[in-house]
Image (tube, grey):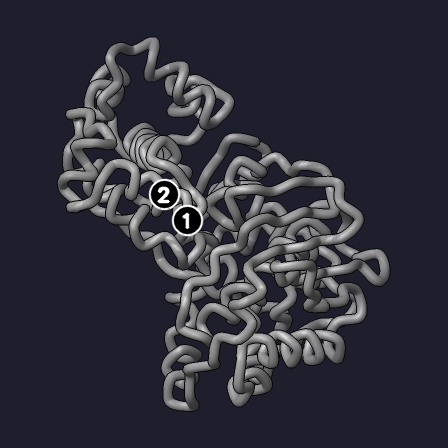
Amino acid sequence: MLSEPGHSRKSAGSSPTVAIGFVTGMLSGVSRAGLAAGSLLDRAEIARDLLDERGARIPVARYAALYRLINESLDDEGFALFSRPLRRGSFEFLCRAALSAATLEQALERIARFLHVVLDDLEVEVERSGRAAVIVISQEQALPAGPAGRVFAHEWLLRMIHGLAAWLVAHPLPLDEVSFPYPPPPHAADYELVFAPRYTFDAPRLEARFPAEWLALPVRRDEAALRSFLVDAPASITTLYRRDRALSLRVREHLRAALPDHLALPALARRLFVSPRTLHRRLEDEGTSFRAVKDGLRRDLATDWLTKTTRPLSRIGADLGFADAAAFYRAFAGWTGSGPREYRKRFTHSTGG
């Protein structure tokens, strides 16, 4: 199915979460296709009132379940976002069109040609700009699903193209920078995890840049690999988060294991048998930082414990390694836009996994 390639970012003791803005965008076309968004949310076990809460987050597993439900219920792998549906099976044929390409450049050209055939609303091209290769997504006509649908259509299409490209060459392809053709959405804070360390908004068109030399990478997948990829697709390619973050996942696991103690970067570098400078550089290469990984872990654990346990707020802050309740409050409010007590009252039992 025309799904979003990715890689599960599981870590011990915490449940990865997705900003509610991605859910709102994914649902933005279903009503015009005759489906009730509330019913789909119920079946995916996502509380309906979360759609109205800017700071809400849901487990990745619930996001993946909703993704599949929409595709299957509509027989449309494009979520009813476009002027004509992408019937189920479109993603398989897209994979097959690119599978026999010799290089990444040829594969991307075939992906763009296939999408030109099936999509009237958005046009995909691959350009060169100096030492950079650029995936370009231009809007050819107004999308019928409204502003939220337009945002999600660009988000989804870029993730699909980029994730499929990385799978084809069996190599991480971290993007250097992405410009988006719309104002910052409410969930823009997640863009570092989803797309690239540098991103801008209000551009004339979507442009995603990566080193041009990667275009010469050979396509390494074969028919057997494709069959396995497609069979496992619901579990392996519906998560949002980038596939090029192997070190950041290890850092996250070490930080989780050390809690409530604070593990500083030099100490963590020693555990990973690298210098602090090398660790900093390699995390930067993955489009993140030590601070961002630590904050992401604390945020996911905090929202998990607030909504799924009765653990006192003071203990949650202490278990996350905060010096005092005020420090925990400030950090949590920065992550979600509300204090932990207010968040617990609104979301208890709504984001359970």
Q: Farthest front residue?
A: 130
At 19% from the left and 36% from the top, the residue drawn is 268
In front here: 48 or 3?
A: 3
Count of numbered tags? 2
**Picture quadrant where residue 243 is located:** bottom left
Q: Residue at x 57, y 77 (%)?
A: 91
Residue 350: where, in percent of width, then height? 41, 38
Name the residue carrying label 2: 281
Quarter holding residue 118: bottom right
**Residues packed near mark 1 inside 10 Å, few (<14), some (14 to 19) or many (20 plus):** some
Label drawn at residue 285: 1
Amino acid residing under circle 1: Asp
For marks 2 and 1, give the CA distance: 6 Å
Q: Is residue 234 left or right of residue 138?
A: left
Q: Amino acid under label 2?
A: Arg
Q: Relative to 43, is 329 above or below?
A: above
Report the front residue among 50 and 218: 218
Please tell me whether residue 348 is drawn above or below residue 30 in the rendered image: above
Q: Assign a secondary structure to mark 1.
A: helix
Above or below 112: residue 4:
above
Q: Residue furthest right?
A: 141
Q: Position of residue 163 (x, y in %)?
A: 50, 65
Residue 340 seen by the camera: yes
Residue 349 in view of the camera: no
In the rendered structure, the answer to whether residue 255 lies left or right of residue 217 reads left
Residue for point 25% across, 43% down = 251
Residue 48 position within the rendered picture, expressed as x and y whole percent measured from the top left? 53, 41
Could you say where residue 12 lies in the image, as x and y percent from the top left? Answer: 21, 46
The residue at the point 70 percent across, 61 percent down is 136
Q: Are marks 2 and 1 in contact (CB under 8 Å)?
A: yes
